[in-house]
Image (cartoon, grey):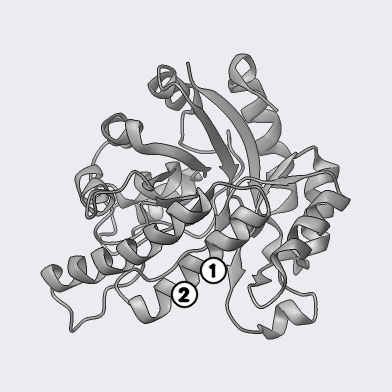
Amino acid sequence: MARFRIALNMEYCRSEHKSFEEGVRIASELGYKWVEPMVHTGWELLSEVNFYHSFSMEEDPLLMKEICDKYGVKVSAISGHSPLMKPEAAVPRLTRAQVFADACGARFVNSDEMIKPDWMDDETAHHMMKYTLTKAAMVAERHDTYICIEPHGIYTRTAEGLLKIVKLIDSDRIKVNWDTGNFYLAGQECPYAGLEKVKDYVYHMHAKDISFELSEKERDNTEVNGTPVGCACGDGVVDYSRVKEILKDVDRDIFLSVECGTIDQAARSLVHLQEVFADSLID
């Protein structure tokens, strides 16, 4: 039987211009025991002046753990989204993100394929992604981490396209971070049927709900593959009881990382998910 933990993706405080530490503190006060930090390479101006939550991988990874420990929360995963078709950027980002995950006690690094350059054909794109994932999987083996691919691009609009990327290399280190909102907005197939097809690979999830207004505006747009953040879980189109039912026979622990846009939405999402998953939640 599947067991679930609820986490909070740090994007929830971006609209409030909060620093990483402030975002962790607020998450703890809301009642979250797990967070999903976002990381970047180099030194990002807004982060350096505490207006943005992203954490620089130039810092000591144990500093991230120290901050989380200070507020009594743990790291569920690292949001290390990297352009898989651009290995010169993706390989260093994904590999360093796994070092951060391992140092913080997390086992997952989330990514998606991101943007395909106009000059690149599909065959070349998949060759590039295969190279990137091959290099990253070597680091995953050393650090006992998993790279979880999220539906949020032109190739992951369908379950078949998502699984094609997951299976580009023969490695059990490549899994799925299922984003309930992105797959719904892509609109290529029923999101629940899609989850059924990939559930054996789902180790981490973005619990992202989509407002009825956004659904009406963007779901029929063929250029839309997802959205940065959703509304509060329970306020939109996603049926989390149905998600739970599909995953109930998967025998492992799965994180539900809330990906919403405001502090209030984060608070209400926690209440809703605690109600829906009450009988299968673990600390």
- The percent position of residue 49, horizontal first and vertical second, equals 80, 81
Q: Quadrant of the C terminus?
A: top right
Relative to 283, residue 122 above or below:
below
> What is the quadrant of residue 140 in the picture?
bottom left
Report how far apart the C-alphas of labels 1 and 2 lie in the structure: 6 Å
Q: The residue tagged with tag 2: helix, strand or loop? A: helix
The residue sitting at 24% across, 54% down in the picture is: 169
The residue sitting at 72% across, 77% down in the picture is: 47
| Residue 262 located left or right of residue 66 | left
- The percent position of residue 8, horizontal first and vertical second, equals 66, 46
- Decide: marks 1, 2 in contact (CB < 8 A)? yes
- The percent position of residue 174, horizontal first and vertical second, equals 36, 49
Q: The residue tagged with tag 1: helix, strand or loop? A: helix
- Check disc 1 and report the residue beneath it: 96
Q: Crowding at label 2, few (<14), some or many (≥20) Cα neighbours within 10 Å?
A: some
Residue type at the position of mark 2: Pro
| Residue 267 located left or right of residue 99 | right
Q: Confirm whether residue 219 shows in the render.
A: yes
> What is the quadrant of residue 168 in the picture?
bottom left
> What is the quadrant of residue 60 in the picture?
bottom right
- The percent position of residue 46, horizontal first and vertical second, equals 71, 81
Nearer-the-camera pick, 276 or 176: 176
Q: Which mark is residue 2?
A: none
Relative to 29, residue 282 above or below:
above
Relative to 112, residue 249 above or below:
above
Q: Confirm whether residue 195 shows in the render.
A: no
The residue sitting at 24% across, 64% down in the picture is: 130
- Check disc 2 and report the residue beneath it: 92
Residue type at the position of mark 1: Arg
